[in-house]
Amino acid sequence: MREESKAKKIAGKIIVAALVLLWCVIAFLPFFFMVMGTFKEQFEMLMGGVFKMPQQLYLDNYIEVFQGNIWNYLKNSVVVLVISLTVLLFVSACAAYPLSRFKFRMNKPIYSLIVACMSVPIHVTLLPIFLMMVKIHLYDSIWALIGPYIAFNLPISVFILVTFMQGIPKELEEAAEIDGCGKYRIFWSIMFPLVKPGLATLAIYNSVNMWNEFSFALTLTQRAENRTLPLAIWEYQGQYAMNVPMIMTVLVVSVLPMIIAFIFGQDKLIKGMMAGAVKG
């Protein structure tokens, strides 16, 4: 019986390893061929196809992209991301603290309203937000993107941080109150540092959403100097309709910052997810 159970465990591990390997191949191959396509000439791609390896490392695609307006698109994306993410995390933490630790009459209705906002489709609000930005004279500027990015990522951020803060022992707050700490001091000295895993998880999750956002960037900006990186892909696709290697080059340049950020932040993302799972 022991040998039979041991054989089943080994077979189970082999099956799991095979499925993981298959998933890695399926996930990695499209990106691999996209990167390889950036080193091909236009006619080489047309004649040889997508899955044929390049005959030589043709670097002119990258040279042409970096000599273009890509740096301006990249700068706009970074500015919008940094400002939106900083304000989002701060407001989310400030909102989650009283909702998770204080008892007052409107606690549950406010929290329920925030959770309900998670179900609102963002595309329904495109026209109202467009008209609002025109009236307040923010249309066709990167500042028009910051408000919507914060507003539509705020409900899920508050929801996750409330879960984190509810798992923090109340004895820590009671001990701090005995030592004479007020609510503001407790928030900054105790609660805020303890939810850093949750903040790191939200930072990575929301960064990907903001970096890749297309609809609001297309609707609320018009001039090339005010557009973000996803719109650079759209414009290059129109400009080089048949130049597939050039389009792939822009895609690689656009996705590379998020891959680098994930490589350096994956440990914090996993720790945050595990901490949230344990506390939830």
Image (cartoon, rainbow, N blue to C red):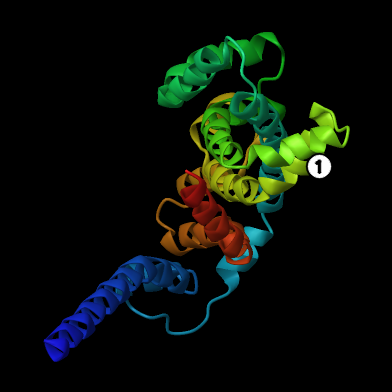
**Which of the pair 55/213 is nearer the observer?**
213
Residue at 21% over, 77% down: 12
Residue 210 occupies which quadrant of the picture? Answer: top right
| Residue wearing tag 1 | 189
Going by the image, does 104 lie left or right of 136? left
Q: Looking at the image, which residue is at 53% across and 77% down?
A: 58
- At which x and y percent is residue 5? 16, 83
- Left or right: 119 in relation to 252: left
Badge 1 marks a residue whose secondary structure is: helix
Q: In the rendering, at what x and y percent does residue 223 appear?
A: 65, 31
Query: Where is 260 relative to 210, above or below?
Result: below
Q: Residue at x 49, y 69 (%)?
A: 38
Instruction: Kindly identify the amino acid type of the residue bearing the numbered disc 1.
Output: Ser
The quadrant the N terminus occupies is: bottom left
Q: Position of residue 272 (x, y in %)?
A: 56, 53
Residue 216, compared with residue 7, is above or below; it is above
Give the image quarter of residue 32.
Answer: bottom left
Quadrant housing residue 162 = top right
Q: Please state the total of marks drawn on the protein image.
A: 1
Residue 138 x, y percent position in the rendering: 70, 19
Q: Nearer the viewer, residue 50 or 259?
A: 259
Residue 214 seen in the figure: yes
Please give the name of the residue rendered at 56% of the width and 59% of the height, measured from the top-left corner: 271
- In the displayed structure image, the side of residue 251 where residue 25 appears, left or right: left
Placement of 85 over or under 4, stated as above or below = above
